[in-house]
Image: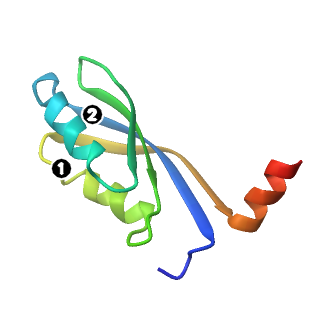
Amino acid sequence: MDAKNQFNICGVFVQTTPARLGDVELSLINTPGVDVHQTEGDGRMVVTVEDTPDKYASDTLADLRLVEGVLSASLVYHHCDTESQMSEDIKS
């Protein structure tokens, strides 16, 4: 990847069936760049997806739709920043 000084973070709403929630959650937890923040018993999940050294967040997001049991994965938030901009934001 040539964007090593760039950071992408995506907020994603994932929907599965209640019966598949545990399997999908485990699969997502084991996916590099994916963090599961909240799950609901009806199959709703809130996750974030970030760039990894080997894969862009957008590619990981597309792959989430291929996880067995995922009914949908919808991007609801995206933020892109550079390392230098993030350092400036932290200082101010």
First in sequence, mark 2 or 1: give its number.
2
- Is label 1 in a helix, a strand or a loop? loop
**Of 18 and 32, the residue lying toward us:** 32
Residue 32, above or below 28: below
Residue at far bottom of view: 2
Kindly report which numbered mark, 2 or 1, lies closer to the viewer in this rendering. 1
Q: Amino acid at mark 1?
A: Val
Drawn side of residue 3 relative to residue 60, left or right: right
Q: Name the image quarter holding residue 52.
A: bottom left
Residue that badge 2 annotates: 15
Q: Amino acid at mark 2?
A: Gln
Residue 3 badge: none
Do residues under tags 2 and 1 come within 8 Å of each other at their CB atoms?
A: no
Going 19% across and 29% down the picture, which residue do you hit?
A: 21
Drawn side of residue 81 relative to residue 72, left or right: right
- Is label 2 in a helix, a strand or a loop? strand
Drawn side of residue 91 relative to residue 53, left or right: right
Residue 75 is situated, as x and y percent measured from the top left of the image, at: 44, 46
Residue that badge 1 annotates: 67
Drawn side of residue 12 relative to residue 5, left or right: left
Residue 19 is situated, as x and y percent measured from the top left of the image, at: 10, 24
Count residues near mark 2 (Cα–Cα under 10 Å), then give few for <14, some for 14-19, many for 20+.
many
Going 32% across and 44% down the picture, which residue do you hit?
A: 73
Residue 24, above or below 57: above
